[in-house]
Amino acid sequence: MNYNDISTRLARLKEALTIEERDGESKLMKTVRDKAGTVSFAPQMLPLLNKVHSDISALANMKDHLKKLAKQKGIAQSIVEEKINSNQELQLLIDLNNIEKHGTPLNKSRSGFNPILKYHSISMTIKGSSSGNNYITLNSSGQISTTGSKELKFEFGIYNEFGELVNLLSKVIAKCVNEWSKIIEELSKIE
């Protein structure tokens, strides 16, 4: 398998966007029990932010790989830049990556503002078992057990400098993966 193949690279990115969980424990989530015994879930912000920025960077770096692919096919690399400049989600992705690399404010923003990434929310979905007897239990060490599978979703918002929500990071990432896929498909058709 050629790990640097552009399609393989995109498939690796899609896989990396999922959150790893081992033995019911996620490095990104902590179970907290207060004195009254009430259990809540607290995101571990540093590991979570590292994961988010790592994923943003890996996805944004597709730009350079696509430009290289265009050059190899004898096409102007500017076609990739044009695709980015015509798509707000790709612009936001590149801006978020550039802020992480160079700091804020950006000298030149593609999206027209300096996007700010903020923790937005967390949700947990339990997908039921085929038996229909679905339950959630929490043992004394704070581990969650379910009859079905559980999915934790961390959501970050992308805000403008006035504190207004521009988009949700999950939507931006999904759109960017889709846009990169389209560009790969277009470039792959060219001999």
Image (cartoon, grey):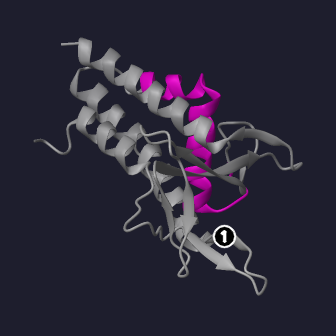
On the image, the x and y values in percent for residue 168 come to 68, 41
Q: Residues within 10 Å of mark 1 (few under 14, many from 20)?
A: few
On the image, the x and y values in percent for residue 105 come to 73, 56
- Left or right relative to 6: residue 183: right
Pick the front one: 5 or 35: 35
Residue 111 is covered by the magenta coloring: no
Residue 188, compared with residue 145, is above or below; it is above
State which quadrant residue 100 falls in. Answer: bottom right
- Left or right relative to 29: residue 77: left
Q: Pick out the residue farthest to the right.
A: 162
Pick the front one: 65 or 119: 119
Residue 92 is covered by the magenta coloring: yes
State which quadrant residue 182 falls in. Answer: top left
On the image, the x and y values in percent for residue 81 come to 49, 29
Q: Residue at x 39, y 22 (%)?
A: 183
**Majority SS type along the magenta span:** helix
Residue 133, compared with residue 88, is above or below; it is below
Given the image, on which type of amino acid does mark 1 rest? Ala
On the image, the x and y values in percent for residue 62 come to 39, 40
Pick the front one: 84 or 25: 25
For label 1, the SS is strand
Quadrant placement of the N terminus:
top left
- Label 1, on which residue? 42
Q: Residue at x 50, y 45 (%)?
A: 133
> Which region shows up in magenta?
79-107
Q: Pick out the residue farthest to the left.
A: 1
Pick the front one: 118 or 96: 118
- Left or right relative to 165: residue 118: left
Residue 131, compared with residue 76, is above or below; it is below
Q: Residue at x 52, y 23 (%)?
A: 82
Q: Residue at x 77, y 87 (%)?
A: 35
